[in-house]
Amino acid sequence: MSLYENYRKTSINYDKTRVPIGLEIILGCFAKSGKPLNEMIVLDAGCGTGSYSHALHEYVRRIEAIDINPAMVEIASRKLKRHREEGRITFSQASIDALVFTSRMFDAIMINQVLHHIDNPNDQGYPTHHRMLREFHRVLRPKGILVINTCSHEQLRHGFWYYRLIPEAFGEIIRRYMPIDQLIEMLFEYGFTYRGSFVPLHDVLQGEAYFDPYGPLKKQWRDGDSVFALVTPNQLYRVCERIRDMDSRGTLLSFVKEHDSQRKVTGQATFLLAVRE
């Protein structure tokens, strides 16, 4: 579910740069349920191309993976064909705020880098977030685990060197991310207890591709970060011209180094752990 990115077009390139980060954090959070991992039924809400399901399926009993975008679901389904046939994972096209599952069905839910796609900046009070958390509470068993992988505003400001090149798109994308303290308050409102947050400081969402100073020049690279869906053709032209200019003057690498320096302090993503009461 994205209100601004056309994943029908970009899904084909998504896995060429994006990697699932924080896997050990997610497993550690799941383990706090008190139930053995290999007995857990997990919902992957907004599964995308299935990278997190692919990385974690061998640790749990079964994963139900959903995404609203059919292109993403198709790629994920192909990627895990053997595991689908073994009954370890099921993929379906569905919305995260109107779940088709029965109440108290899941031991854990993970939602990775999805929240900024589901409400517009001008929406009053993040209405889809409210419906989503209500549904998550309904389908989780008591003491079930919810793991939310998102970005803090500080991480958005300091964790992505190329955001300095696209100030208009950055201004819009940061408004789409609910502030983490506000998200924590909403968790309490819907019957969750917040148990802490975790930041994988050394992980980057685009893997080694993130460090490519020429990345923004390439569509395949840009398809790995939906922020570029908010960049107009004229803005993209200026970005590419600026990169080429810095490259010709020998300042491109220093630009990347300068604007990436704080990432090592802030990280790029925050994982919130909550328990359903």
Image: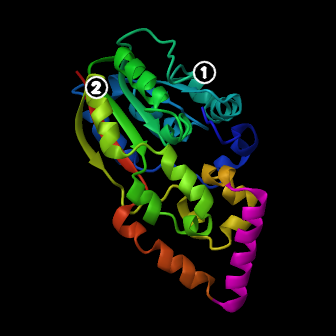
Numbered label attached to residue 246: none
Q: Is residue 27 among the parts visible in the rendering? A: no
SS at badge 2: helix
Mark 1 → mark 2, Cα distance in angstroms: 29 Å
Q: Dot 1: what SS? A: strand
Residue 141 seen in the current view = yes
Please tell me how crowded label 1 is: few (under 14), some (14-19), or many (20+) other residues with Cα within 10 Å: some
Query: Relative to the observer, which residue lies in front, 52 or 61?
Result: 52
Mark 2, residue position: 189
Q: Residue at x 75, y 58 (%)?
A: 219
Q: Residue 131 is drawn in which quadrant?
A: top left
In the visual, does 250 lie left or right of 96? right
Residue 241 horizontal/vertical position (percent): 75, 75
| In front: label 1 or label 2 | 2
Residue at 67%, 67% (x, y): give it.
215
Percent coordinates x, y for residue 176 in the rendering: 51, 44
Apparent side of residue 158 relative to residue 30 in the rendered image (left or right): right
Residue positioned 73% across, 67% down in the render: 217
130 left or right of 211? Answer: left
| Label 1 vs 2, first from the N-terminus | 1
The answer to whether residue 163 is above or below residue 150 is below
- Residue 92: give its label: 1
Indicate whether 215 appears above or below 274.
below
The percent coordinates of residue 23 (x first, y second) are 40, 46
If the image is split into quadrants, where does the C terminus sit?
top left
Magenta span of residues = 231-250
Residue 133: quadrant of the picture? top left
Q: Residue at x 58, y 82 (%)?
A: 253
- Indicate whether 232 appears above or below 40: below
Badge 2: residue crowd in 10 Å (few <14, some 14–19, many ≥20): few
